[in-house]
Image (cartoon, grey):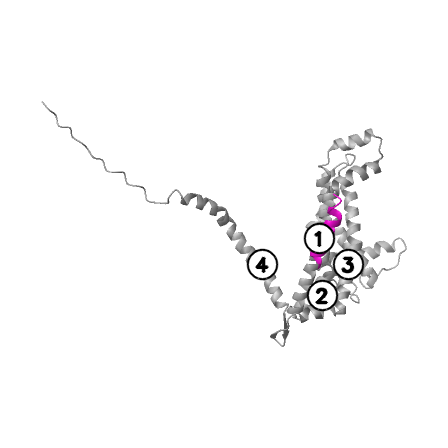
Amino acid sequence: MTMSATQTHTAPAPQRAGRSPRARPSVRRLAPYAFILPAAILFATFKLYPIGWSFVLSLFKSVEGVDTYVGFDNYARLFADPLFWTALQNTVIILMIQVPLMLALATGLAVALNSTVLRARSVFRLGFFLPMTTGLVAYGIIFSILLNQQYGLVNWLLSLIGVGEVPWLADPLWAQIALGLVLTWHYTGYNAVILLARLQTIPSELYDAAAVDGTSAWQSFRHVTLPGLQPTILLTTVLSTIGTLQIFDEPYVLTRGGPDNATLTIGVYLYQNAFTYFDFGYASAIAYVLAVLIGVLGLIQFRVLGGKS
């Protein structure tokens, strides 16, 4: 008896419709760019576009509401403008006096706040950092009241020790001194906290070794603390330089750039041309020159201070 074998034929299983395996790596490679795309669009819209448009504006001059292309005439006008040089001179004076003083005070304050002898260090740290949280316009108004020549609290306290009225905001020299003191009060605590954070990362073994060698407190500060703080001192110096070159709120609120243009800074002069005289082309030229100045000074500081670290 013979049995006929039956052969069964099975149809191949249908493939799933969808993305091919080769497409998945491409999607994975593009996924990070998709995540940063919204931020990139916002950055281009609110940063790159205004920067580019500002340069375009610097090539035009508005005459009776009509923008006229003048090329680089605004830049030539800027370098021949005595008020611009006055503003630049005032800004540089504030920079050269206030920034070193502030950083010296911030360094000393950071060392004091890091001392184990000081009790309630957290309270002191908070107290010195609080001025940085105060709004620029708010504390500018407060100091304009405190430094008022006739009824200000500062002059009243000075009168108790026999000092006459000091024209803090009415005399050119005293106005510059007052502006420097206000800036120092506001930013010293902030820089001290940054320096303190770096100070706490310096290994204590270095101080122990210095003590074994019989070094004094000053020698330990000079040969251990300062070298350890140098990268952070460079950072705070660059940030303070950039901030001082752009200073606007304090001199504008305190004196509007006066008296006799003594506190006229580049930021105040830029604002006056843009929003008082509506000369946006000239204001844009000032902004670009200021940006170049900030970049050059930043590179110089990195070369000089960074090369020593």
Q: Residue at x 86, y 54 (%)?
A: 158
Direction bottom: furthest residue: 64
Residue 280, quarter of the rendered image: bottom right
In front: label 1 or label 3: 1
Q: Position of residue 201 (x, y in %)?
A: 71, 37
Q: Which residues are magenta?
A: 293-309
According to the picture, the residue beneath numbered tag 1 turns out to be: 299
Q: Residue at x 52, y 49 (%)?
A: 36
Q: Quadrant of the N terminus?
A: top left
Q: CA distance from mark 2 to mark 4?
A: 24 Å
Q: Residue at x 83, y 57 (%)?
A: 155
Q: What is the total number of numbered labels drawn onto the structure image?
A: 4
Query: What number is the disc on residue 269?
Result: 2
Q: CA distance from mark 2 to mark 1?
A: 25 Å
Q: CA distance from mark 3 to mark 2?
A: 14 Å
Q: Amino acid at mark 3?
A: Val
Pick the residue in front: 249 or 269: 269
Image vertical order of residue 237 relative to residue 111, above or below: below
Q: Position of residue 207 (x, y in %)?
A: 78, 33
